[in-house]
Amino acid sequence: MLRIAEFEKVSFKQFRRGFEDVYGGAPENEIREVYDSLTLPVRATQGSAGYDFYLPHDLVLHPGESARIPTGIRVRMEEGWVLLLFPRSGLGFKYRLQLDNTVGVIDSDYYGSDNEGHIFAAVTNDSNSGKTLSLKAGSAFMQGVFVPFGVTESDDVCARRNGGFGSTSET
């Protein structure tokens, strides 16, 4: 196996900013408690391709409901690799849990962005059978798979990223 990346927590300051953006104000000690309990993504078994991401807080989603999740996690990876994010297979199968952008794409240069490369997830319970998804803090909800990628022979891009969602295009 190639060792091409390392997960880290974002700084507490960055996590607090993301947490407050999603949930509004909260006492700093409560946000610190959530931050201190964050778990870095890991693989469940030797044969697993996906690194499980864990919820920083309890999550209840009724059918049709969505939530944004500040994971508190960033990833440093070698150039030429990308981290693809998917819902955990069982949650997709049982609840039709979906990432709102279908597949998350974390580029290697996202790590150096102003937001420290803070990985957020936007999820929806798309259940059409009336099932409510209820997960406790610390539950695995999403998985990330590292994949190498190539570029065209004529590629001459030299632009630098500085931001998150939509930061590499006008739309």
Image: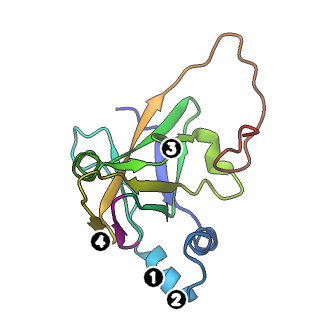
Pointers 2 and 1 in contact (C-beta within 8 Å) = yes
Local SS, label 1: helix
Residue 107 in the image, given as x and y percentages of width and height: 58, 39
Q: Which residue is mark 2?
A: 29
**Circle nearer the N terminus (3, 4):** 3
Q: In the rendered structure, find residue 101 and report the number of the disc placed on it.
A: 3
Kindly identify the residue that appears in the image at 40 percent across and 74 percent down.
Answer: 37
Residue 98's place in the image compared with 83, above or below, is: below
Contact check, label 2 and label 4, Cβ < 8 Å: no
Residue 10 position within the rendered picture, expressed as x and y whole percent measured from the top left: 56, 63
The residue wearing badge 4 is: 136
Q: Kindly report which numbered mark, 1 or 3, lies closer to the viewer in this rendering.
A: 3
Which badge, 2 or 4, comes first in the chain's sequence? 2
Please tell me which residue is depicted at 63% across the width and 46% down the height of the picture: 110
Q: Nearer the viewer, mark 2 or mark 4?
A: 4
Q: Image height check: is 149 above or below 31?
A: above
Mark 2: secondary structure:
helix
In the image: residue 161, left or right of residue 129: right
Secondary structure of residue under mark 4: loop
58 inside magenta stretch: yes
Amino acid type shown at disc 4: Lys
- The CA distance from mark 2 to mark 3 is 32 Å
Q: Is residue 70 visible?
A: no
Task: State which region is magenta.
Answer: 57-63
Measured in 3D between alpha carbons, the distance from the residue under mark 2 to the one under mark 1, in whole angstroms, is: 6 Å
> On the image, numbered disc 1 is attached to which residue?
33
Q: Secondary structure at mark 3?
A: loop
Q: Which residue type does callout 3 highlight?
A: Asn
**Label 1 Cα neighbours within 10 Å, binned few <14 / some 14-19 / many ≥20:** few
Question: How far apart are the alpha carbons under marks 1 and 3?
Answer: 29 Å
